Amino acid sequence: MSSEKSSSMHTKDSQSIASWPSSITLRKPAPRPQPHYETYLLRLNPALKTIKSTTSICSLPIVRTYTHLPASYYIKPLRSSSTEIKAFLDTSYAKNRNNLHSSSERGVREIKSQRDRDREAEERARSTILKMDDDAQREIQKLLEAREVATSGPRVKRVWDVVAIVQRWRRRIHDDGPHPHHLQLMNGTSGNEKKRFRKRKEEERPVEWVLVLKAEAVDFEDRVMPTRYGNPFDEDDSDGDY
């Protein structure tokens, strides 16, 4: 009798478990993926001054008025392979290593783990950004916020950081060497004047910054996106007896 009762209870338990809604599932924690890297170019449009009007007497300009456009920064995506991204990271890391003052500091740096070196690289990049103009910092901050919004969802949050900054000369169109007029000026000057001319031209040459961004998933928790006039209690209010 007891065996029949236990078997019937087992059958009822099996039926009750089978009757659970199929929508109820036990979700396993998602595996933490590898970091994702992207590269962008930060460029500076220099200030521009153009002639607005000219007042002349006997064909001689007497008064000129100008329009001034302030300098501005902008960011554009940079298509890069994994090899190129690694080269940017290595360049930034080598620069950080050369900035160490003593050989003992370098020795300590070498034995640190990769995670510690990545953290130091991020701190170095953050310090470099803080030394930039406010407009450049705003452009970088807007980029990071946009990438976080685009890559995060209701069940995952990803954080983006700048992990490396590499400054380089900005490539010009048809930049195949010095202009013939520049060569003529350099050939007719002394050695010191040539050096000063090259230095002045390098200072005038525009630069750009390669930004290496890294994204990491920090957690996998359910999140609710609030709205200003939304009511999160609609279902409770419709089911309750008030």
Image: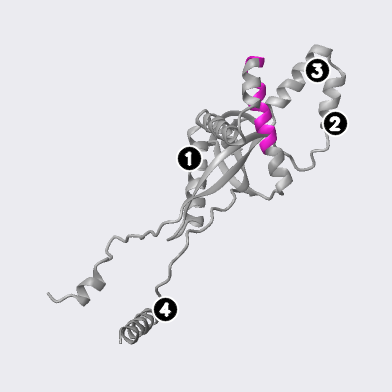
Q: Which residue is mark 4?
A: 22
Few, some or many residues within 10 Å of mark 2 (<14, 14–19, 20+): few
Viewer-side residue, 58 vs 235: 235
> Residue most toward the front?
1
Between the C-alphas of marks 4 and 2, the distance is 78 Å
Residue matched to label 2: 180
Task: Provide the residue designation for mark 1.
Answer: 138
Q: Quadrant of the N terminus?
A: bottom left
- The colour scheme applied to this rendered structure is one colour
- Tags 1 and 4 in contact by the CB under 8 Å rule? no
Q: Earlier in the sequence, mark 2 or mark 1?
A: 1
Number of marks in the rendered image:
4
Q: Nearer the viewer, residue 225 or 217?
A: 217
- Residue identified by numbered label 3: 194
Q: What's under tag 1, amino acid-wise?
A: Arg
Q: Of the residues tagged 2 and 1, which is closer to the observer?
A: 1
Q: CA distance from mark 2 to mark 1?
A: 40 Å
Q: Quadrant of residue 31?
A: bottom right
Q: Earlier in the sequence, mark 4 or mark 2?
A: 4
Amino acid, disc 2: Pro
Give the residue displayed 83% in from the left and 13% down from the top. 191
Measured in 3D between alpha carbons, the distance from the residue under mark 1 to the one under mark 4, in whole angstroms, is 48 Å
Horizontal side of 121 relative to 22 (left or right) equals: right
Q: Which residues are magenta?
A: 89-103
Q: Quadrant of residue 202?
A: top right
Q: Secondary structure at mark 1?
A: helix
Give the mark nearer the N terminus: 1 vs 4. 4
The x, y position of residue 62, in whole percent, is 58, 27
Query: At 62% from the left edge and 25% from the top edge, which residue is drawn?
Result: 109
